[in-house]
Image: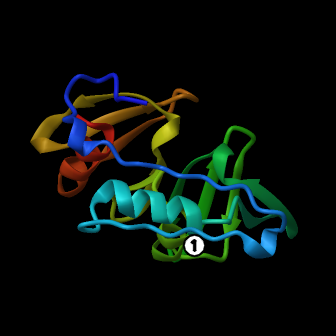
């Protein structure tokens, strides 16, 4: 199916072939690429990332947070907190570990925070090269100027 964005050349469209197999033991993916670009890296990440939950704690009880429900994660005083619509929970993971686990829909927006890109309602320029992002739950977070370029690239700006 041709791309509808009118920006792609016909040669830029990747061919995808799917073959249904009889067993999950037969499932595998082969990727043939001239170079490992960001879209290829995202596809690999999506295929390899089978983690859709993060174990957290709340008042001594274990709470399972689905990654699709996480708005952002923050590190404060050597503790990592996960924020969802339902509340704030602590997790044993460090931010760098969460970056590896979570994949392409998450973005390091400052030294102490990772945000779920799919939970961003809008972004706007702020002082000193920073950006301000408003999340779907109404919270506002700052994107440090060191990370603005990566955010723009991920959002296609």
Residue at left offset 83%, top offset 68%: 23
Coordinates of residue 58 in the picture (x, y in percent)? 80, 61
Figure quadrant of the N terminus = top left
Quadrant of res 80: bottom right
Question: Residue 19, relative to residue 133: is it above or below?
Answer: below
Taking the view exactly as shown, the residue that stands out farthest to the left is 128
Residue at left offset 79%, top offset 76%: 25
Coordinates of residue 44 in the picture (x, y in percent)? 47, 65
* Residue under pointer 1: 79
Residue at left offset 80%, top offset 60%: 64
- Is residue 9 shown left or right of residue 103? left
Coordinates of residue 87 in the picture (x, y in percent)? 72, 45
Disc 1 element? strand
- Is residue 39 shown left or right of residue 144? right
Residue at left offset 36%, top offset 48%: 14
Task: Mark 1: give few (<14), some (14-19) or many (20+) Cα within 10 Å.
Answer: few
């Amino acid at each position: 199916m041709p791309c509808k964005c009118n920006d792609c050349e016909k040669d830029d469209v990747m061919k995808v072939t799917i073959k249904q197999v009889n067993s999950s033991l037969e499932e595998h993916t082969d990727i043939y690429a001239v170079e490992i670009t960001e879209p290829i890296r995202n596809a690999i990440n999506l295929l390899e990332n089978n983690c859709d939950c993060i174990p957290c704690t709340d008042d001594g009880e274990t709470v399972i947070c689905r990654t699709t429900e996480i708005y952002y994660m923050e590190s404060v005083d050597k503790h990592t907190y996960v924020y969802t619509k339902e509340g704030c929970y602590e997790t044993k993971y460090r931010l760098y570990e969460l970056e590896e686990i979570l994949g392409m829909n998450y973005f390091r927006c400052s030294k102490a925070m990772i945000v779920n890109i799919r939970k961003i309602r809008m972004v706007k320029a702020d002082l000193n090269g920073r950006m301000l992002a408003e999340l779907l739950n109404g919270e506002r977070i700052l994107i440090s100027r060191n990370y603005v370029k990566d955010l723009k690239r991920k959002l296609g700006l």
